[in-house]
Amino acid sequence: MSAPTRITEQSRSAPTAVRELVRSARKGALATLDVPGAGPYVSLVTLATDPAGAPLMLLSTLARHTTN
């Protein structure tokens, strides 16, 4: 497991810093609002990033999040 990324260089742009932070993450939380009247539904997901730094998650249509 890698250590959290620290943003210490003032010259680094915010978008670049965020892409580096997301790229260093291996796990994330995916949250949706459950059926009306219920609370949030949150689960742990593994993630990766595409070459531009956008997060990628593989979700099944069987996942509860796809119905919320």
Image (cartoon, rainbow, N blue to C red):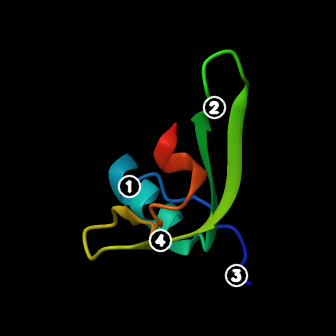
Disc 2 from disc 3: Cα separation: 33 Å
Q: Which residue is rendered at x = 61% and y = 27% of the image?
A: 35
**Count of labels shown?**
4
| Residue in front for this viewpoint, 53 or 9 | 53
Residue with the mark numbered 3: 2
Residue type at mark 4: give it.
Arg
Front tag of 3 and 1: 3
Mark earlier in primary sequence (2, 3): 3
Disc 4 from disc 2: Cα separation: 28 Å
Query: Marks 1 and 2: in contact by CB < 8 Å?
Result: no
Disc 4 from disc 3: Cα separation: 11 Å
| Mark 2 Cα shell of 10 Å, populated few (<14), some (14-19), many (≥20) | some
| Mark 3 Cα shell of 10 Å, populated few (<14), some (14-19), many (≥20) | few
On screen, residue 13 above or below 51: above
Residue with the mark numbered 4: 23
Residue with the mark numbered 2: 34
Query: Marks 1 and 3: in contact by CB < 8 Å?
Result: no
Question: Which quadrant of the view contains residue 3?
Answer: bottom right
Q: Which element is circle 4 on?
A: helix
Residue type at mark 3: give it.
Ser
